[in-house]
Image (cartoon, rainbow, N blue to C red):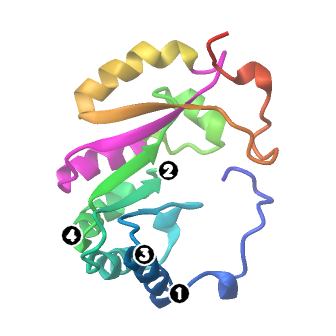
Amino acid sequence: MPQEEYSWLPRAEILMFDEIVSLVSMFTINGVGEIHITGGEPLLRPQLPKLIDMLASNDKIRDLALTTNGVLLSKFARDLRTAGLRRVTVGLSTLRSERFTSLTKRNTHSEVLSGIEAAHRAGFEKVKINTVVLRGFNDDELGDWIEFERQVNAEVRFIEYMDVGGATGWAIDSVVSRG
């Protein structure tokens, strides 16, 4: 979240690992087989590989996945894979570092690319990349994304730009659609 004024939940309101595992157990008993760890940014959670290990011990989970911005992925990819994480999705909306910095207000583009490489080295067979397409910003990169997908053995998914409560300055003119 690039907004510096973002309101974080007090730590006392964040579920503890045993509470998460208990909830997931209830879900899987009732037929849920896919668990996706998302955020905020889940890699900021201390000892995340421990949570993954705890969840991976549930044999009713068919798919245990994580969605990340990728900045810290190179640091944690191997431990997450060893702990039992089966799939990783990285949010990356541009292949150009200057655009990335403009969009995220962070100069961490190379770290995200390193995270994608680290995920493959850690044994994740196919990494997914979510790319939000913005008219007039990165819509000229679609061909580049197809080539990148081939080079890094990733599945690039083009995501529609959506309003998230005004946090991103959403405007209808930025949405890429059929029209």
Give the residue type that dot 1 points to: Met
Numbered label attached to residue 16: 1
Q: For the residues labelled 4 and 2, say whether their Cβ atoms are less than 8 Å apart.
A: no
Between 179 and 143, the residue placed more toward the observer is 179
Q: Residue at x 49, y 26 (%)?
A: 96
Graded by Cα atoms within 10 Å as few (under 14), some (14 to 19) or many (20 or more), the crowding at tag 3 reads: few
Q: For the residues labelled 1 and 4, say whether their Cβ atoms are less than 8 Å apart.
A: no
Reading the image, the residue beneath label 4 is 82
Earlier sequence position, callout 3 versus callout 2: 3
Region rendered in magenta: 112-138
Q: Decide if residue 9 is on the left or right side of residue 70.
A: right
Residue 81: x %, y % from top left: 24, 64
Reading the image, the residue beneath label 2 is 69
Q: Decide if residue 165 is on the left or right side of residue 111.
A: right
Q: For the residues labelled 3 and 4, say whether their Cβ atoms are less than 8 Å apart.
A: no
Earlier sequence position, callout 1 versus callout 2: 1
Reading the image, the residue beneath label 3 is 30
Point out the frontmost of discs 3 and 4.
3
Earlier sequence position, callout 4 versus callout 2: 2
Residue 87: x %, y % from top left: 30, 54
Earlier sequence position, callout 3 versus callout 1: 1
Give the residue type that dot 3 points to: Asn
Give the residue type that dot 2 points to: Asn
